[in-house]
């Protein structure tokens, strides 16, 4: 039985790739504020965190269907990035236009 795209993405970075791409594009135009503050008194690891696995899970043999699925996901990621850019441009045009009353 084939893994669903959601299950396969934990090992191959399918969700990490679009996140990094969108972050890089947004950071390039200065739309990400990277300043954060973390107070160590409120961020604690679970008491079982010491036994966490350090190595990623072993890679499985890649089938032709998995390759096709990865291509579909890559195309969807490209479309998502384009939609994000279009929405941002549209929002910027609306914000820059004078208010209209009907």
Image (cartoon, rainbow, N blue to C red):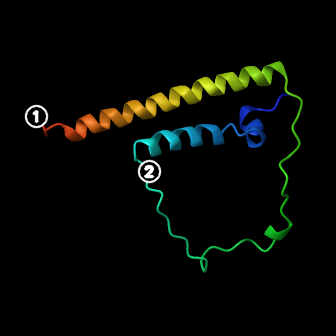
Residue displayed at 13% across by 38% down: 98
Q: Which residue is mark 1?
A: 102
- Residue 84 lies, in percent from the top left, at 44, 34
Residue displayed at 76% across by 38% down: 12
Residue placed farthest to the front in the image?
Answer: 28
Q: Is residue 92 left or right of residue 37?
A: left
Contact (Cβ within 8 Å) of mark 2 with mark 1: no
Q: Residues within 10 Å of mark 1 (few under 14, many from 20)?
A: few
Residue placed farthest to the left in the image?
Answer: 101
Residue 32 is labelled as 2
- Residue 65 lies, in percent from the top left, at 79, 20
Q: Is residue 32 left or right of residue 97?
A: right
User: Quarter holding the N terminus?
Assistant: top right
Q: Is residue 45 left or right of residue 84?
A: right
Instruction: Give the Cα distance between marks 2 and 1.
Output: 35 Å
- Residue 44 lies, in percent from the top left, at 67, 74
User: Quarter holding the C terminus?
Assistant: top left
| Secondary structure category for the residue under label 1 | loop
| Secondary structure category for the residue under label 2 | loop
> Foreground residue, 16 or 30?
30
> Foreground residue, 51 or 28?
28
Above or below, 46 relative to 5: below
Residue displayed at 83% across by 48% down: 56
Residue displayed at 49% across by 64% down: 36
> Foreground residue, 46 or 96?
96
Q: Is residue 94 left or right of residue 40?
A: left
Number of the front mark, 2 or 1: 2
Give whichever of discs 2 and 1 has the lower sequence position: 2
- Residue 78 lies, in percent from the top left, at 55, 27
């Amino acid at each position: 039985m084939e893994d669903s795209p959601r299950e396969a993405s934990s090992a191959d970075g399918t969700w990490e790739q679009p996140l990094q791409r969108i972050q890089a594009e947004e950071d390039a135009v200065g739309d990400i504020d990277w300043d954060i503050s973390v107070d160590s008194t409120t961020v604690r690891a679970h008491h079982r965190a010491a036994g966490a696995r350090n190595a990623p899970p072993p890679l499985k043999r890649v089938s032709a269907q998995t390759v096709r699925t990865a291509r579909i996901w890559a195309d969807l990621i490209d479309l998502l990035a384009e939609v994000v850019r279009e929405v941002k441009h549209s929002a910027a045009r609306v914000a820059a236009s004078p208010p209209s009353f009907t």
